[in-house]
Image (cartoon, helix red, strand yellow):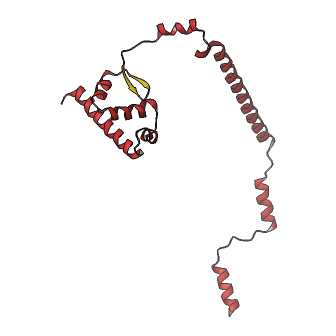
Amino acid sequence: MNAFLYSKKIERCHSPPVLTSFQMQSILEMEYRIMTDKEDKTVRQFVLFCRTALMYEKKNYYNERKHRAERETHIEMLSLKQSGMFEKIFDTYHADYFSVMGYEIGIVDGDLAQALRKLPDKKIQIVLLYYFVGLSDREIGEIYGTGRTTICDQRNNAIKKLRLLMEEMHYGK
């Protein structure tokens, strides 16, 4: 009776069929099929095409870098006389300057500068330190002796207030 139950279990099992050696050999031949001369020639032509394309792309890249290096000069390599001519080129705009922790920050946008002046000094400093100096909330919190979340809340409130002030300037009350 155990043998009968055992054979029933095998019938229910969905195991893959056992392949004969002839079937295995035919599968292996399909996987490692020998290419015909025409297919081999096509593959070799494609490989040659890819190699050639990459070689010329590499040459173009290095030629472009060489050409750019000949034409361009880093601004730090210029003499004082040469660098003085750039003062004539750059446009100078009226800027409102804010002094924050030893940084002199110029704001060119008059509306933004006017709205910033309406904020409390601490919020102005937090906004300028975050957006213009690039300090994180944690670093600003260390300067003021408060936590990161407090600085984040104050900055977000200051931004909301700035937005309202600038909308009032543009669209009226």
Q: Position of residue 108 (x, y in %)?
A: 37, 20
Q: Residue at x 39, y 31 (%)?
A: 128
Looking at the rendering, in which quadrant would you find the C terminus?
top left
Q: Nearer the viewer, residue 46 or 69?
A: 69
Looking at the rendering, in which quadrant would you find the N terminus?
bottom right
Q: Quadrant of residue 167?
A: top left
Q: Is residue 138 left or right of residue 116?
A: right
Looking at the image, residue 138 lies above or below residue 105: below
Q: Is residue 148 left or right of residue 56?
A: left
Q: Quadrant of residue 25?
A: bottom right
Q: Residue furthest front?
A: 145
Looking at the image, residue 118 lies above or below residue 89: below
Q: Nearer the viewer, residue 77 or 129?
A: 129
Q: Nearer the viewer, residue 54 or 33?
A: 54
Looking at the image, residue 149 lies above or below residue 60: below
Q: Residue furthest bottom?
A: 1
Q: Quadrant of residue 19?
A: bottom right
Q: Position of residue 82 (x, y in %)?
A: 57, 7
Q: Nearer the viewer, residue 156 or 41?
A: 156
Q: Residue at x 31, y 28 (%)?
A: 116
Looking at the image, residue 139 lies above or below residue 61: below
Query: How many numbered marks are there?
Result: 0
Q: Position of residue 164 (x, y in %)?
A: 26, 34
Q: Is residue 25 left or right of residue 168?
A: right
Q: Residue at x 68, y 26 (%)?
A: 57
